[in-house]
Image: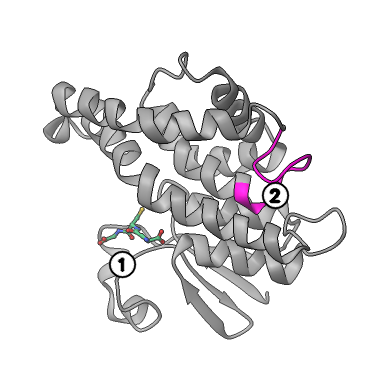
Amino acid sequence: MALKIYGVARSRAFRSLWMATELGLEYEHIKVDFTVGTRQPAFLSINPNGHVPVIDDDGFKLWESMAINLYLGKKYGSGAAGLYPQRLEDEARAWQWSFWGMTEVERPALTALLKRIGPESERDPGAADEAERALAAPLRVLDAAVATQPYLLGEHFTVADLNVASILSWARQARVDLSAFPKAAAWLKTCHDRPAAQAAQQLQRE
Ligand SMILES: N[C@@H](CCC(=O)N[C@@H](CS)C(=O)NCC(=O)O)C(=O)O
């Protein structure tokens, strides 16, 4: 198979598994876990950071979940109704939202998850509440962005939505209260209800 995706679905590889499924790609799933598997010399030779996800697309190796999804989108989803925007400005906004997700949302969302429902030894309700409070500012931005249009780039679901919604899946799992951000909450549910997202979530349970 031409495309390989490394990383168990309970890791950030979820994002790329969702993307590949959304694009209808066939791929080989190499279920590297993020404790032991990422430390193996064979794995470190494809990602010296020791992190998943990684893809190998017919010999082309790429790491960083957002970069992977933008690459897959551009290569396989650039058609007229595709997941990847055609106009340069829309492409730039897909990058904007992806970088925004990583820099503004990921850390508090992950902290809320680990501190609220992570391993017993990690749990800390106070830290989870603080992370939830830190999410309010980016959630306000998101809420406004989807108040006047259904998706981040306009009328259609794109890689921008997928990337941000996949990062925010941690916030939903952490039961972050989204009631003050009804538009963002509705948008997130719409994204997570997509069959490809459901299929990737199913992989998390296997
Ligand atoms: N910025 C990277 C982060 C990747 C990352 O930290 N992945 C975690 C799993 S969710 C991992 O592989 N951890 C293993 C380790 O750090 O040892 C991305 O988005 O791909």
The quadrant of the rendering that contains the N terminus is bottom right
Image vertical order of residue 50 relative to residue 93, above or below: below
Extreme residue in the top direction: 179
Question: In the displayed structure, does residue 146 sit left or right of residue 43?
Answer: right
For image coordinates 53% across by 51% down, the residue present is 97
For image coordinates 44% across by 66% down, the residue present is 64
Q: Which residues are magenta?
A: 150-160
Q: Bin the neighbour count of mark 2 within 10 Å (Cα to Cα): few under 14, some 14-19, many 20 and up.
A: many
Mark nearer the viewer, 2 or 1: 2
Corner quadrant of residue 187: top right
Q: Earlier in the sequence, mark 2 or mark 1?
A: 1
For image coordinates 52% across by 67% down, the residue present is 67
Corner quadrant of residue 107: top left
Image vertical order of residue 163 relative to residue 72, above or below: above
Spatial separation of the CA atoms under disc 2 and disc 1: 30 Å
Type of amino acid under label 2: Thr
Question: In the displayed structure, does residue 139 sit left or right of residue 43?
Answer: right
Q: Which residue is mark 2?
A: 158
- Expressed as whole percent of the image width and height from the top left, the position of residue 173 reads 41, 28
The verdict on label 2 being within 8 Å of ligand 1 is no
Q: Which residue is mark 1?
A: 38
- Expressed as whole percent of the image width and height from the top left, the position of residue 12 reads 43, 52
Type of amino acid under label 1: Thr
Image vertical order of residue 157 relative to residue 112, above or below: below
Q: Bin the neighbour count of mark 1 within 10 Å (Cα to Cα): few under 14, some 14-19, many 20 and up.
A: many
Q: Is residue 154 magenta?
A: yes
Please tell me whether the stretch drawn in magenta is mainly helix, strand or loop: loop
Question: In the displayed structure, does residue 103 sit left or right of residue 60?
Answer: left
On the question of residue 32 being in view, the answer is: yes
Q: Image quadrant of ligand 1?
A: bottom left
The verdict on label 1 being within 8 Å of ligand 1 is yes
